[in-house]
Image: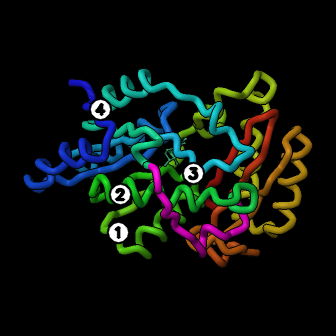
Amino acid sequence: MGVKVVRTVQALRDAVAPRRREGARIGLVPTMGALHDGHVALVTHARSLADVTIATIFVNPTQFAANEDLSRYPRTEEADLARLSAAGADLAFVPSPAEMYPQGFSARIELDGPARAELEDRFRPGHFSGVATVCAKLFLQSGADVAIFGEKDWQQLAVVRAMARDLDIPIAIIGHPTVRETDGLALSSRNRYLNAEDRARAPTLHRVMTMIALQARQGEALPSLLEDGRRMIVAAGFVLDYLEARHADTLAPIITLDQAPARLLVAARTGSTRLIDNIAL
Ligand code: AMP
C-alpha cells in the first residue's frame, strides 16, 4: 500500500487522531524532500520506534537566507512519494508555503545556546530560527511522540533538541548516524549539484576529519591538527567556512579530548555547492 499524502494541517490531524486514540506511538521525519538513502534510513529508524510514521516534505522558506538556494532547491515530489512508499512510511505531510505560513503569520522562535555556536549560524544568519519555528510547528501539528533527525546536521540536531526541551514540547528527539557514499561523502540533496570535479574533491572533507580524529585519539594536539586539516581542505580547492572541534552537546569550543564528548564539524564550498559534515572525535 502506498503512503497516504496529506497537504493540510487539518487533514494531518484527522489522519493521526484515530491512531492516537488507539494508543499508537507516532513518529515524525521532517525533510525538505529530494529524498536519498539518508532520509530513507531515518524513516526506517522511525518505523522501529513508532506505530505510525509520518514523513514531511516542505522546503521551508524561512530557513533560507536571501542569498541562498531556495528557488533552485531540488523538488522531486513524485519520486519522493515513491521512496516513502517503498520505505514503509504511513503518511506524507506535504504542505504548501501558504498552509504553513498563511497571511498574517508572525511568530518566530528566537534562540540562544547551540544556535549561537559560531558555526552554521555565522554563515547562515536566521537559519536556525527558521528551522526551530518550522520544527515546532511540525511537532505541534503532528502531535508526534518521537522525531528522527540526521547527525549529518549536527548543530541542527542540537538546536532542535534544546528547543523542544526548552518549550516543553512532549516529543523525544532522536539522532540517526550519517549515511555516506562508499568514499565517505555524506549523502545530501545538494550533492546532485556537484560537477565531476567537485564530486571528486568532495570526499576530502571526510578523509581529513577521519585523519584528525585518529591522530587526536593517539594524543596529537588538537589545535595543530585542526590547522593542518584546514590547510589540506583549502589545498584541495575548497573555500573553507570552518573546521572546528566542539563539545558534542553544548557546541562550546574545546582544546583537548578530555573535554569529551567531542565532535569535529566542517563546512566548505566547492563550486557553487556548500557541503557540511561532522564526525565524533
Ligand atoms: P533535509 O531534507 O536535508 O532537510 O534533511 C532532512 C533530515 O535528513 C535531517 O534530519 C537531516 O539531518 C537528515 N539527513 C540528511 N542527510 C543525511 C545523511 N546523509 N544521513 C543521515 N541523515 C541525513
Report if the CB atoms under discs 2 and 1 are less than 8 Å apart: yes
Find the distance from the CA under tag 1 to the CA under tag 4: 25 Å
Report if the CB atoms under discs 1 and 4 are less than 8 Å apart: no
Find the distance from the CA under tag 2 to the CA under tag 1: 8 Å
Q: Is disc 4 placed on a helix, strand or loop?
A: strand
Tell me the residue that label 3 is attached to.
Answer: 62
Which one is earlier in the sequence, the residue at label 3 or at label 2? 3
Label annotation for residue 169: 1
The amino acid type of the residue labelled 4 equals Val
Q: Is disc 2 placed on a helix, strand or loop?
A: helix
Label annotation for residue 139: 2
Q: Is residue 241 one of those drawn in magenta?
A: no
Q: Name the residue rendered at 29%, 36% in the picture.
A: 6
The amino acid type of the residue labelled 3 equals Thr
Label annotation for residue 30: none
The amino acid type of the residue labelled 1 equals Ile
Residue 25 position, x and y percent, is 20, 54
